[in-house]
Image (cartoon, rainbow, N blue to C red):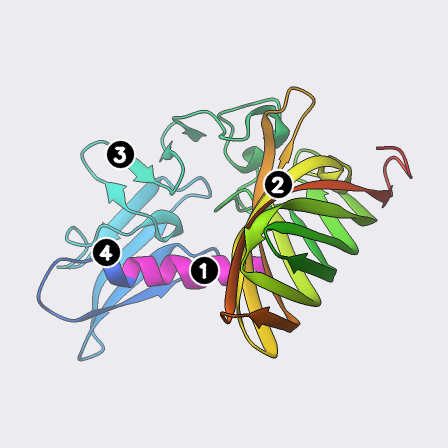
Amino acid sequence: MKRSLFIFIALLMALLFGATSKATTFYHADGNGNITALMDANQNIVGRYLYNPFGKLIGKWGVMADVNEMRFSSMPYDGLAGISFFPLRPYDPNLQRWLGQDPIQEAGGISLYQFVYNNPINEIDPFGLWTFGIGLQFSGELALALGGSGGFYIGRNPDNGHWSVGFLFGPSGGAGGPASLGGGVFAQVTTAKCVDQLKGLGFQMGGSAGEAITGGADFVGGLDNDLKVSYTGGQVGIGLGAKVPFPGEVHVMGTLTGGWDSDNGWKN
């Protein structure tokens, strides 16, 4: 599902920011989201691209091949510099490495410039999202925001392919309003490399809207022992609730998460 979502987003970016000609062209991509062909309104192939596994352009053909800027991984490509521009840092397919350090530092591996762990055939790294969780949450707000959540999480460390699972839970507290009370289910994706990394102090900020049935979204993150951000991610939820006097609320809260995971058991 993660690969399919990435390809959909990448193709949407290609449609929005791709070829600059007034002629209508349509993108075709392979299973890894690489733009491999352009087709005009008459279903003629007007551009074709061939890459090696690390994204180096082996060949290109067609009258529109040079006009299109969306290439490897459906990302913008600068032909003069030979660089692909991903959302968080540029990539050089000739050097087979990133040109900037990993934003999450060594949490993503000891090499800060390595491209998908030198395994581009089996791995993708569009955003660095590696843990997924689902569960239940509840909250109540007046001037203060109080709540809690618990759920099942699964993570994969791309350094060694190790999978981890766990059941985590904990309270949250901060500021929010207007007055609300509710609960429901949530889904969360983060940059943490394993479930154990989710334990400890963290934060979330966001809001929800709706009356009897509510939907919400939060930006979430974790803090290490030096109170530096150790991972980030996003969370969406849907549930039942009551909000007075407005059908919406916002909050900023600290979180404390603990529980069991397959790597370290109940140890935080």
Magenta stretch? 1-14
Three-letter code for the amino acid on which mark 2 is drawn:
Phe
Q: Secondary structure at mark 2?
A: strand
Q: Is residue 183 left or right of residue 62?
A: right
Disc 4 target residue: 17
Which is more foreground, mark 2 or mark 1? Answer: 2
Q: Secondary structure at mark 3?
A: loop
Q: Position of residue 27 (x, y in %)?
A: 30, 65
Q: Which mark is residue 7?
A: 1
Three-letter code for the amino acid on which mark 1 is drawn:
Ile
C-alpha span from label 4 to label 3: 18 Å
105 or 219: nearer the viewer = 219
Residue at coordinates 39% horizontally, 57% vertically from top-left? 10
Which is more foreground, mark 3 or mark 2? Answer: 2
C-alpha span from label 1 to label 3: 22 Å
Disc 3 target residue: 82
Which is more foreground, mark 4 or mark 3? Answer: 4
Magenta span: predominant SS is helix
Three-letter code for the amino acid on which mark 3 is drawn:
Gly
In the rendered image, which quarter is residue 225 located in?
top right
Residue at coordinates 76% horizontally, 42% vertically from top-left? 257
C-alpha span from label 2 to label 4: 34 Å
Disc 2 target residue: 203
Three-letter code for the amino acid on which mark 4 is drawn:
Phe
190 or 237: nearer the viewer = 237
